[in-house]
Amino acid sequence: MSTAILDLPEEEYIMPGTRTCAGCGLPIAYRYILKALGPKTIMTHPACCLTILHGIYPKTPIAINAVNNTFASTAASATGLAAGLKATGRNDFTVLAMAGDGGTFDMGIQALSGAAERGTDIIYVCYDNEAYMNTGVQRSSATPSGAMTTTTPFIPKEQPKKDFVQIMEAHHLPYLATACSAYPGDVYNKFLKAREIKGTRFIHLAVPCPPGWGFPTKDTVKLGRLSVETGVVVLYEVVRGALQLTGKSLSMARSGRKKPVEDYLKIQGRFKKMTAEQIADFQRQVDERWEQLMARAEF
Ligand SMILES: Cc1ncc(C[n+]2csc(CCOP(=O)(O)OP(=O)(O)O)c2C)c(N)n1
Ligand code: SF4
Ligand SMILES: [Mg+2]
């Protein structure tokens, strides 16, 4: 059961006035992540929209310590923080590494794979807005097929989204989860759980982005919910190899009801050039992945 909004801790670690765009999905999720991890957290992040959220030194709306690292180095930076804390005997801190899809799927994969293979004691979060948003919506390997970006402007992206969660699963992690900013209780529960586990914990976090995806700022939560209700994003966790569906995905699996992907695609400008054939292919990809996960899931 996801924690109810009213039962979340009252402490806030993001003060009013972040520099993210109106309607950004990222600060919504980050707020609940920090509520779960608490003040004894040191975080590290590369250049990305999260840097924008953290603000320009010496001012920041964030009430925890943070390091701004270079693009490909998030997991290496986190490894250094974990080693420093260990060397100075501060075992009560959590190291949080958080990077975008560009900084994880593409640029940061090498350092992350190394840290994960060594079992470095960090929580690594890839928040996925499905493109290089901070620099103006360039396609990444997380961009889904059918999406237009500034580097796929006339013909939508042809290649399917890289299945990064599966790559991370191949590292035999003690804890791996997927989450979406539209479900705060589910996000909170997963980070609470991750905090109590040692070793490399990986969380893939889907965050809708109004300017990059082309939808009104008021619809961020609606978009996040639709991504899950259509099965484009599936909420689950894998604890030592056992896959458990969570939240809305679990209730969808039990009821057998899943909305058509078109409900999700048609309200985003980035998918407006998709043909009926491409939409059918997208639906096929989503159904295939859904069936694979259902076959593995415990519910
Ligand atoms: C080595 C290097 N190349 C390029 C950049 C420019 N740059 C800064 S942020 C960014 C986009 C990051 O995309 P992503 O990781 O998906 O995060 P998002 O901006 O979408 O939140 C790029 C290309 C950089 N800072 N360093
Ligand atoms: S570009 Fe997208 S992800 Fe970046 S701050 Fe704006 S809404 Fe958020
Ligand atoms: Mg991105």
Image (tube, grey):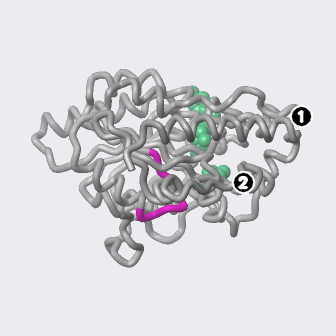
The amino acid on which the numbered mark 2 sits, given as a three-letter code, is: Tyr
Task: Name the element at disc 1.
Answer: loop
At 33% from the left edge and 52% from the top edge, which residue is drawn?
65
- Of residue 110 and residue 227, the one placed in the foreground of this image is 227
State the image coordinates of residue 18 (x, y, percent, origin top left).
Answer: 54, 63
**Disc ID at residue 28:** none
Determine whether label 2 and label 1 are within 8 Å by CB: no
Q: Which image quadrant: the N terminus? A: bottom left
Question: Which quadrant of the structure image shows residue 158?
Answer: top right
Magenta segment boundaries in residue numbering: 178-185
Q: Is residue 179 magenta?
A: yes
Residue at label 2?
Answer: 264
Q: Is residue 135 magenta?
A: no
- Where on the image, by quarter, is ligand 3? top right
State the image coordinates of residue 232 (x, y, percent, origin top left).
Answer: 62, 46
Q: Does the numbered disc 2 mark a residue whose Cβ is under 8 Å from ligand 2?
A: no
How many labels were placed on the picture? 2
Task: Name the element at disc 2.
Answer: helix
Q: Vertically, is 291 above or below 192?
A: above
